[in-house]
Image (cartoon, rainbow, N blue to C red):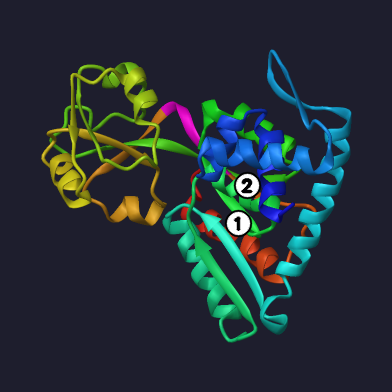
Amino acid sequence: MTFQQLQYFLEVHRTGSVTKAAKNLYVSYPSVSVAIANIEKELGIVLFSRGPKGLSLTEQGKQVLEYANTITQAYMQMNDLRQEGRRAIRINAGDYETIATAFAKLIEEYGTDYNTDIMMTTCNSDDSFRLLVTGEIAVSILAYMSYNVDNIEHRIKRDGLESEDLIRIPLAVCLGKKHRLYNAQHLTAQDLRGETAMVSYSKSLPWHTVFRLTEPKRILRVSSPNARRELARRGLAYYVCFMPPKAERERSDRRFIPLEDIHYRVTAVTNPQRAKEPEVVRFLELLKEQIAIDYPDL
């Protein structure tokens, strides 16, 4: 039995599905299925039973789960002792200015510690949950839409993680001075119906949901940020984005108007089985301070 097989087993348990586990782990269905079969063959037991809601652990499977969690926790602890005491601290977050500024301030304070590797990476929520559970990520800053709150909270609870809400940031409509809605104070999905919208090829925003609410008459797919800005300036189309920091809004020649009833919730997620390093504690302090600076009006 290998550690990788145990990770496959844990992911099947978390998702209740071999198919979902394989997708989350970026491996083929047979790889996960064979791993489960090999564990069962080696131990001479059945790990899962199939029900209307998917796979669930048998009584013997629950015993294996306890051992697998113990082994995973030991792996997390050993991972902190790599390279003769050299520590690796990985922070996961999206590419947002506020988070980047807080991370830069953290490096200013701790950058001279050559025994510690502090990394900033970006991955999707499924990967961040998996890496938090295995201890490969120290903290993940999740930004997710208001209508997805229940799903994220369920994942956090199911995986035994802890969370702290940091701020709720509106989804903003970016408009140039020539656009007919430029002087609006607030906008609703109804106000945007029949307008031309822009979208990048990025998957950072749930475009299908936003456009299902706003029903644009036309969608322009523009991958270049400069092209999107120019189209917005000329009033030819709008785009929807994460509300920028106040300073950026004030120096911009475009307006960012809140889209009512739709916002981002920004949450810090950690694994309570992993002790918070002082660098992580400090990063969260710096991030809260930077949020207060960038969004004093929220």
Residue 275 position (above or below residue 229): below
Give the numbered dot on residue 79: none
Q: Magenta includes 58?
A: no
The residue to which callout 1 is attached is 288
Residue 85 position (above or below residue 98): below
Q: Kindly identify the amino acid type of the residue bearing the numbered disc 1.
A: Lys
Q: Nearer the viewer, mark 2 or mark 1?
A: 2
Q: Kindly identify the amino acid type of the residue bearing the numbered disc 2.
A: Arg
Q: Is residue 195 visible?
A: yes
Q: Magenta includes 265?
A: yes
Q: Main secondary structure of the magenta part?
A: strand
Quarter of the image where one finds residue 157: top right
Mark 2 neighbour class, 10 Å CA radius: few under 14, some 14 to 19, many 20 or more: some
Quarter of the image where one finds residue 235: top left
**Residue 277 horizontal/vertical position (percent):** 73, 68
| Element carrying mark 2 | helix
Instruction: Answer with mark 2 or mark 1, whichever residue precedes in sequence.
Output: 2
**Foreground residue among 15 and 150:** 15
Distance Cα–Cα, label 2 vs label 1: 25 Å
**Residue 183 horizontal/vertical position (percent):** 25, 32
Q: Residue at x 57, y 42 (%)?
A: 31
Horizontally, is 8 left or right of 294 in the view?
A: right
**Foreground residue among 9 and 296:** 9
Q: Which residues are magenta?
A: 260-266
The residue to which callout 2 is attached is 130
